[in-house]
Amino acid sequence: MYEKLITGKTLKARGWPEGKTIGLAKAAVAHLMEDGLEREAALSRLDEVLAEPRAHLEDELLRDVAGELLRRHKVETARYEDELRPEPLPFETWGAEGIDEGAVTQMQNSLRLPISVAGALMPDAHVGYGLPIGGVLATQGAVIPYAVGVDIACRMRLSVYEVSPHLLGQKKLVLEKALRDWTAFGAGCKWSGSKRPDHEVLEDPAWKSTSLLKSLRGKAADQLGTSGTGNHFVEWGEFELPADDKELGLKAGSYLALLSHSGSRGVGFKIANEYSKLAMSEHPTLENAVRHLAWLDMDSEAGIEYWLSMELAGRFASANHYVIHQRVAEAAGLQEAAHVENHHNFAWREEMADGSIAIVHRKGATPAGLGVMGIIPGSMGDAGYVVRGKGLASSLNSASHGAGRKMGRRQAISSITKLMRDRYLQERGVTLLGGGLDESPQAYKDIEEVIAAQRDLVDVIGKFSPRIVRMASEAGDI
């Protein structure tokens, strides 16, 4: 209705260029008027976008038209040379005694990049591709797709139910059935027929913003409400809250809870691969040690597209967890009382200690700004923790994203037997549905030591102990 009141002629008269931009501008002004702005006020707001599109890239109603303006104008920031600094910028490390030398070297290399401004290494750190897992890197005017990772927006969600954890014993078969019936793991898994879920994220207008995202909309619909392989899981357990918490809205006590770990599935993988390859092609002279840390300028067409795609992958990952929790809880006859969730493979625009704005990449690291709640899991057999950040600037407001691996997958498979793993779980009262030997608890660092190493980064709010764990099998789907 509103679009009919704003014509292309009106917008052209106000300086808007012809073509796709006009259509996006008409849609944006229509949304603004639907939100209650008068016609002239909505047009004035649109004029602000035309004058400074960069300032509106994170506005849900205006980001599409702002992005199109920047693409059309081909606005570019000053490009950095590919030559590395002779020495890395200094950075702080937590839990250094448990971090392998390779991860430290990767962190040092990342801080030789000309775009880097700060970094930190979390106590769960281990070797990754380019940036170590557990590495936090702040850059100026550029985003590094591989520093976000191939599983964009891999995240945690904990749902708490105001019922006794004794249900884990009393209704164990019901809870197991809910997990078996309403979780799916593996690269090829998808729901079909009456089990195929729906969510408003599938109608997000960002799916139409690039040809890649258009091609991924169908994959998103197929994979909504599913989980990946590896260390991804959905598990029932006991949540212990030692003190009343106003933010959670819960009194001290023990509760039944559901914890999940997964990301943006094939959507994030495709986005990461596409833009990582593009970034590497734009920086062909980077040294081999940092070739996976090739970057995209934030105001370049590719940089804008990646950022919009990354944020959409984040919303999709969040929707995945929401769908899983809603369906599993409904099958078990439960109603959520509180929840906590966070990304740990993502990039954010954040203010640094000196007041400047940087792009903070957390690859396997949990946001831990002042008062920010997050989840740090252990393993299939060990506790995880709900934490509240202390906002320490030297850690770039970050904490670990888990216990962190002390064994690679091959080493774990060759050195840990099924008997060893199952005995460990049995001693802790854990039932495992699926799960490969590479995810055995013995392959991970001691979560208690990892938490102790970052007491200056977070306050522990509550403890989650897994009891019924659902994961992919070694072969993938189960």
Image (tube, grey):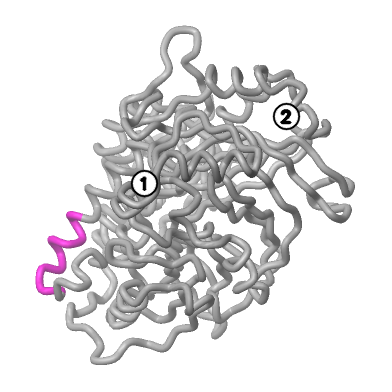
Q: How far across and down, in percent of the image, does residue 407 sit? A: 38, 59
Q: Is residue 246 above or below residue 368?
A: above
Return the residue at label 1: 309
Residue range of the region highlighted in magenta in the rendering: 277-286
Q: How far across and down, in percent of the image, does residue 404 sit? A: 47, 60
Horizontal arrangement in the rendering, residue 433 relative to residue 406 (left or right)? right
Which of the image's four quarters has the C terminus? Answer: top left
Q: Residue furthest bottom?
A: 86
Q: How far across and down, in percent of the image, does residue 42 sit? A: 56, 45
Q: Residue at x 61, y 47 (%)?
A: 341
Q: Residue furthest top?
A: 193
State whether residue 284 appears in this view.
yes
Q: Residue at x 63, y 52 (%)?
A: 384
Determine whether label 2 and label 1 are within 8 Å by CB. no
Q: Is residue 52 above or below residue 263?
A: below
Secondary-structure class at tag 1: helix
Q: Residue at x 51, y 21 (%)?
A: 198
User: Residue 76 or 128: which is nearer the viewer?
Assistant: 128
Inspect the image, locate mark 1, and give the three-letter code of the amino acid beneath it.
Ser
Rounded to the nearest whole Å, what is the CA distance between mark 2 and mark 1? Answer: 40 Å
Inspect the image, locate mark 2, and give the three-letter code of the amino acid beneath it.
Leu
Quarter residue 358 falls in: bottom left
Q: Is residue 22 above or below residue 355?
A: above
Q: How far across and down, in percent of the image, does residue 207 sit? A: 37, 35
Q: Residue at x 52, y 52 (%)?
A: 343
State whether residue 57 appears in this view.
no
Q: What label does residue 168 carry, if any?
A: 2
Horizontal arrangement in the rendering, residue 133 relative to residue 163 (left or right)? left
Secondary-structure class at tag 2: helix
